[in-house]
Image (cartoon, rainbow, N blue to C red):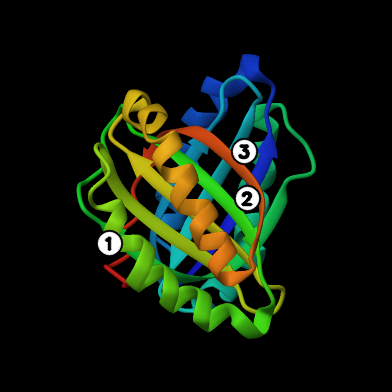
Amino acid sequence: MNARTTTLIADTNRMDDGIADVRDNVMPAVSEMDGCIGLSMLCDRDSGRCIVTTAWETGEAMAATRDRVMQMRARAVEQFGGQDPEVQEWEIAVMHRLHGAGDDSCARVTWSRIDPTQMDRMIDTFRTGFLPRLDEVPGFCSLSMLVDRQTGIGSVTAVYVDRGAMEASRQQISGMRDEFRRQLDMEITEVAEFDLVLHQLRVPELV
């Protein structure tokens, strides 16, 4: 399983127009492409930062769509009043759902970097040591881990039932994150929180 993320900074006054364009135009078009298994979108309405993620059955299916999505991406960026989006392609290493997301759901994204030779160890340790503990966090819904094995960069998105649950988890998750980071000699490069405005990923459980 693979994923492509497109990150942009929107004009906050045009956020709703951009979300509507992704929902009404981009998502239906992408969903009809061979190998597509859904789309999700995160937005920070204060900063304007938006992340659109499309998921694919294989790396080949994802690669085959690169040219076809460029025009849609350009239109979406225009609708958001943004420019120069950052596009990244990933392997989906982990997907776990305890509960489905709802309209009030929010997400915390943690970006990291590790020695690429330690990537398999990191994924295994995350699956066995970190993931089971998340199921005990009140309000936790689901989690996905995206990795780039060549660079050692990773991205973990944890979804919560609402903003209150996400905010209440900060201290507990921070302690777990620090423990995990020290255990693997991994660098945490950024942590950010978002509204989950579109949640149509159909990636099967990968643990």
Does residue 180 appear to the left or right of 80 in the view shown?
left
- 10 Å crowding of disc 1: few (<14), some (14-19), many (20+): few
Quadrant of the rendered image containing residue 70? bottom right
- 10 Å crowding of disc 3: few (<14), some (14-19), many (20+): many
Q: Which residue is mark 1?
A: 132
162 and 131: which is toward the camera: 131
Chain-order first, disc 1 or disc 3: 3
Percent of width and height locating residue 146: 52, 64
- 10 Å crowding of disc 2: few (<14), some (14-19), many (20+): some
Quadrant of the rendered image containing residue 75? top right
Indicate which label's residue lies in the foreground, 2 or 1. 1
Percent of width and height locating residue 176: 44, 52
41 and 30: which is toward the camera: 41
Label 2: element kind: strand
Q: Residue reaching furthest top?
A: 13
Percent of width and height locating residue 122: 52, 74
Q: Which residue is mark 3?
A: 76
Q: Which residue is mark 2?
A: 6
Q: Amino acid at mark 3?
A: Ala
Q: Amino acid at mark 2?
A: Thr
In which quadrant is the C terminus drawn?
A: bottom left
